[in-house]
Image (spheres, helix red, strand yellow):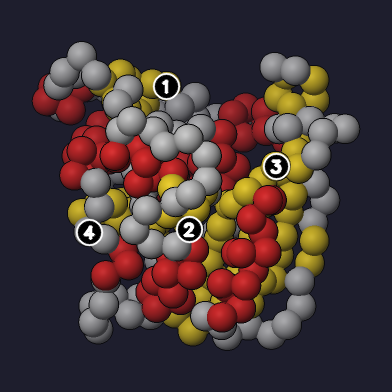
Amino acid sequence: MTCRGLTSYCLMKNNLERLDDLLIDGMKLWQRTDQFRFAIDAVLLAHFPKFNERRRYADLGTGTGVIPLLMTARGVKDITAVEVNPVLADLARRNIVLNHKESEITLVEADYCRLEGSEWVERFDGIVINPPYFTAAQGAQPQSADVNLARHETVYDILDIAKAAARLGKYQGQAFWIYPVSRLMDLLSALKEVKLEPKRMRFVHSMPGKAAKLVLIEARKAGQVGLITEVPLYIYDTPNVYSEEVRSWYERT
């Protein structure tokens, strides 16, 4: 990646920003210390779908745009990244340009639960979603309202988010999720209610011998009943040593 001709996108706007290395395809990412920042779950979700480069995808609640950037490294060429927070949307827009992904990623600054009309309904072949993990009453509330919005269901609950995914996805389209195992039944119930049939599920463990904390799910709009549980995904073999599978994502480049 080069900053030649992209000075405004390569320069830090204020002392809350930092430029991180994604370690994949030479991509870098602007983030802010006072905003929600990506973690390993974004990397896990970006590597879960079996993408088709001829299909159209959306990332709902894109944050800084990390998941669409990682999707381009896997060959996806048509991604709409939706983000309601104007600070994160600005970072995502800058990250798209910084990494020369304008032809693959379109940033839409909007509330994805309010996207309606013929322009949006049943537009996408695949939806990717890393939703808030906690109910409004769960856990400590972050001091930042923006971080709280990203982590807690302060405005929309998981059913509202599932309804949005179902509305935006095409008939027989796919929706890919990552969610805490502790709330798996909440997600499955919401998917069933909006006719997104769970088709594939994979539990994520920090390392062998540890209980799964996250789960990856692929659902299909108006799909037939039939769920496959895949082999577990281990992030680490031993403390601070990535598993062979996770290492392969980085070594690919």
Q: Can residue 196 be seen?
A: yes
Q: Which residue is mark 4?
A: 110
**Whether residue 231 is situated above or below residue 36 in the rendered picture:** below
Q: Nearer the viewer, mark 2 or mark 4?
A: 4
* Quadrant hosting residue 18: top left
- Residue 213 — which label? 3
Name the element at disc 4. loop
Q: Which residue is mark 1?
A: 21
Residue type at numbered disc 4: Ala
Q: Nearer the viewer, mark 2 or mark 1?
A: 2
Name the element at disc 2. strand
* Quadrant hosting residue 2: top left
Marks 2 and 4, the one that precedes in the sequence: 4
Q: Residue at x 59, y 29 (%)?
A: 250
Q: Which residue is mark 2?
A: 128
* Tags 2 and 4 touching, CB below 8 Å: no
Q: Can residue 104 be seen?
A: no
Mark-to-mark CA distance, 2 and 4: 16 Å
Name the element at disc 1. strand
The answer to whether 212 appears left or right of 219 in the picture is right
Q: Residue at x 82, y 33 (%)?
A: 210
* Tags 4 and 1 touching, CB below 8 Å: no
Marks 4 and 1, the one that precedes in the sequence: 1
Mark-to-mark CA distance, 3 and 4: 30 Å
Mark-to-mark CA distance, 3 and 1: 26 Å
Residue type at numbered disc 3: Lys
Q: Residue at x 44, y 74 (%)?
A: 163
The answer to whether 237 appears left or right of 199 in the picture is right
Residue type at numbered disc 2: Val
At which x and y percent is residue 86? 18, 44
